[in-house]
Image: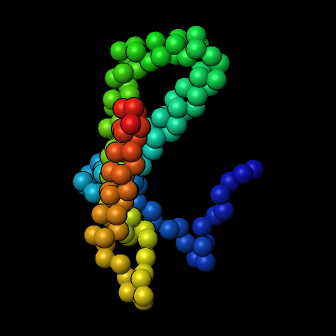
Amino acid sequence: MNQPPAYTAHHPRWYRTRVSTYWWSRKWAYFRFIVRELSSISVAYFVVLTLMQLHALRQGAEVYAEFQEWLRRPLLITLNVISLFFVLYHAITWFNLAPKAIAARYRGKRIPDVLITASNYAAWLAVSGGLVWLLAGG
């Protein structure tokens, strides 16, 4: 009943090459692209972990202490270190990609790519420094 339409001169079959599931592993640029896209999972993981931490904090000191104890498990420490590596990779590749994604102009001239990239890194450094100062009791 659900048969494909028959071949006619007016309906040719198009040639489609088979593409491997691992097409991205054959070229370094494609591999980096796929790893960057997959690193979004680590970003999402840290968002969920932060929300869980805020939830535990709202529940009170005892629940928060249990949550902190849970975070000290070796498996979670390992997962957090690996996720941190991927989040840093994600951020660095985004900062390097930003000049291609942002067509910023000033007085009719395009802002140089290095200026856009450098300003991203400077902002990252300033925010990180501010957080370290704040957490250190500044």
Judging depth in this view, the residue of 60 and 35 nearest the camera is 60
Judging depth in this view, the residue of 132 and 79 nearest the camera is 132
Residue at the image point whose x is 33% and y is 51% from the top = 125
- Up-down relation of residue 17 to residue 54 (above or below): below
Where is residue 94, by image quadrant?
Answer: bottom left
Where is residue 27, by image quadrant?
Answer: bottom left
Q: Is residue 95 visible?
A: no
On the image, the x and y values in percent for residue 30 come to 32, 55
Judging depth in this view, the residue of 29 and 125 nearest the camera is 125
- Up-down relation of residue 101 to residue 33 (above or below): below
Residue at the image point whose x is 58% and y is 14% from the top = 61
Side (left or right) of 28 relative to 134: left
On the image, the x and y values in percent for residue 108 come to 42, 89
On the image, the x and y values in percent for residue 68 come to 47, 16
Q: Residue furthest bottom?
A: 108
Q: Residue furthest front?
A: 138
Residue at the image point whose x is 46% and y is 12% from the top = 69
On the image, the x and y values in percent for residue 95 come to 35, 58
Side (left or right) of 58 relative to 91: right
- Up-down relation of residue 60 to residue 103 (above or below): above
Residue at the image point whose x is 24% and y is 54% from the top = 28
Side (left or right) of 24 relative to 64: left
Where is residue 123, by image quadrant?
Answer: bottom left
